[in-house]
Every structure is written in structure tokens, then in C-alpha cells.
Amino acid sequence: MGSKSRQLRTGFTTGACAAAASKAAATILCGSISARAGGAPEPCSPELWETVMPKQVEIPFPDGSRHLFMIHDAGFTLVDNTAWASVIKDAGDDPDITNGAEIRSDVAIKDDHENAGLIIRGGTGVGTVTRPGLSVRVGAPAINPGPMRMIHEAVLEARKESNVLGMRGLEVTISVPEGERLAKKTLNSRLGIVGGLSILGSTGIVRPISTEAWTATISASMDVARAMGHTEIVLSSGRTSEHAHMAHYKLPEEMYVMMGDYLEYALRAAAEHDFSRIHLSAQWAKMLKIAMVTPQTHVRHGALDTKKVVDFVRALGAPIDKDASEFNTAREILDLLLASPMNNTGIILSNVCAAAKQFAESFTNGIPVTIYLISYEGTVIALHE
């Protein structure tokens, strides 16, 4: 079977990895207590370590399934009754920036807790929520409710399997050693998550090249914008178009939402959030796709047909005499328009924006959309309100 027909491999979320590491650490902690109660050697000895150190753990997932995780590293500190373990995240075939990251959990006995509860904290490399609108309160570690439940269930399962009695409170600290560095490659700061990564994953499974991560970020960004009191939102198809709009209009950062290629989803989500106006910023190729009624603008859903583009812009009044076959890319068509000695280029570009506006507003339940066309040099060259 050829490589093109190979099924893409799924992976595990940071939340699932955190739960697995937590179960491993809790297993070490409980095993150490049981061994010492039976008169075994001290926890640092090789004999005891072999009995309490799990090479792998199996944890429950939200859908009722169970999955096995290999333990990357682990340890135990007798002085403060703390065990720790880590898992290396495998995101499968998804291009996840956290793929290969070490997810660590420290589990400690805290006899000073008022009850036999379980406290879950964020450590090094786990971000802190600083803006309202997310599923986690301001000031709390950026560990979403789904992963919180998975960690809780995994640790309680370790206690049950170890049959340790009399242990009171446990404190679990999740950390990602490289989290702060990796977070700079994400949109966390836009969401008000500072100092590290979010521990995510409602299902525990990462599905490669899925829309889930994108659409979740789009919705979360809009939640934050509304919670911050904004009634308008700016959607952009990429970094250049977003930065160009930011530089020109200087709106607050939390108003900007990177929609990528998910045009229809982003517009419908903005309507559901009841924004009073939507601003949409994109470069020429993406703008053409919108104007030519393409709800999903990724190239895998079809590359632009330059003949159709030429026919389209000619219908809008573009003075193109060259045969359509002479153009290899949409950008060449834009370059020709911008170099035209005629004075109607601005009108043509505005007409493209008007067509994009008409299509965009078909998804917004009457909410107006302002369209901004961004040059490849990163400036606003046309708009339509």
C-alpha cells in the first residue's frame, strides 16, 4: 500500500499525558508507603524501587476506553513524601508543537489538608489564566476541566489499586519543563494565558490534521473578547493580514481572532457570540476564494483556478488582455492589476472586497462584515464596509 493511502496515526493530548504521569507518580507514592509499612527497605534502595516504579500505566478515558502510556522518567523524595513521573507526549501524525514534550506530575502527601481531597496545581511551564471568558477562572492554572477530571480519576484509581489506607490529602502539580518556550509558538497570550502552555484535551485523543484545535481556539478567542467587553471582532486568515490590520487600526489585541482557513465556522461563531460587527482581513488569494464563494479556503479544498480568477475579475471590470493560460498564480494577476496604467484598479479591488462581503454576510445572520484586502507587503490596499 502506498504512503499516500496510509492512515494517519492518532495521538494523545497533553491532558491525557498529565493524567498518565499523575497515575504513575501516585502509584510510586502509594507503593512506597505500602512497602515501608511492610518493613521493606527505604524508598531509595534498588530493591524497593523495582517494586514501586511502573514502566507503564493504563488510564481511563472519558469515552470509557483505556489506554497505555510508557513512563519516561520518575523519582521519589522521602524527605517530603513526594513522587514524580513524566510522559513524553506523542501527538501521532498531528503537527502539534507540543509533540515530544515532557509532561510531568509531582504527587505529594499533604496531611495539613482539611479533608481527604485531591488538589491539582500548575507548575513550571503551565500557564496561568489572566483574562475572563475561558472555562478556567482568572488566576487559576490553565488546566481545562476535561484534563482535570482525567487527572483526578487516574490518581484515585492508583490509590484504589494500591490499597493504601489512612492517606489523607494529595497534592498533584502538573508541569511542562519546556512549556514557557513552547507557549511562545501558540496563541496563548492572545487568550490571556501567560507563563506557559494550556493543558488541553476534552477526549484525551489528538486526531491528526483535525479541525478541533483550530475551532476550539477560535471559539475561546471570541469568548475572551466578549468577556473583555468588546462588541466587534477582527477575523484574519493569517499572521500577515492580522499584523497589517493591527498596525493600521491599533485595536486591542484580544479583539483579533486567527480564523485560518475556517471562514464559515468563524463567521457563524461570531454571529453566535452576537458581535455587532465583524472585520475580516485577508490577502489576495484567500480574498479571491471568499469572493468566489469558497467557505473553506485551505488549498486542499481546491487550488485557485487562474482561468476562473481571470474571468471573475474581468467581470468586475478588470482590463486584462492577456490569455488566462499565461498566469501561473493568483498573485501574478494582482501584480498585473497593480501595475496597470488605468485608474480603475482601486475600484476592481474594492469590487472583489464587495463580493467577499456579500458571501461572508450569508453566514452572519445580518451582522455586517467589513472586508480588508491586505497586500503581500502587509498593508491595507482595499476595503469595503
Image: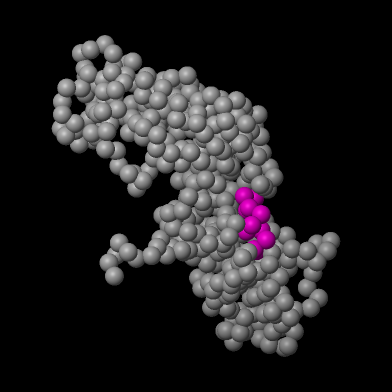
Residue at x 59% of width, y 68% of height: 20
Residues shaded magenta: 141-151
The location of residue 283, given as percent across then percent down, is 36, 30
> Which quarter shows the N terminus?
bottom left
**Residue 130 part of the magenta-drawn span:** no
Viewer can see residue 94: yes
Report which quarter residue 270 is drawn in.
Answer: top right
Front position in the image: 201 or 34:
201
The quarter holding residue 92 reads bottom left
Residue 259 position, x and y percent, is 47, 38
Q: Is residue 75 visible?
A: no
Left or right position of 188 against 6:
right
Where residue 295 sits in the image (x, y, percent)? 43, 39
Q: Is residue 226 left or right of residue 94?
A: right
Viewer-proximal residue among 94 and 264: 264
Q: Residue furthest right?
A: 114
Q: Residue at x 56, y 38 (%)?
A: 269
Residue at the image point whose x is 58% and y is 33% from the top: 271
Q: Which is the main secondary structure of the residues drawn in magenta?
A: helix
Residue 108 position (above or below residue 305): below
Asked if the magenta segment contains residue 150, the reply would be yes
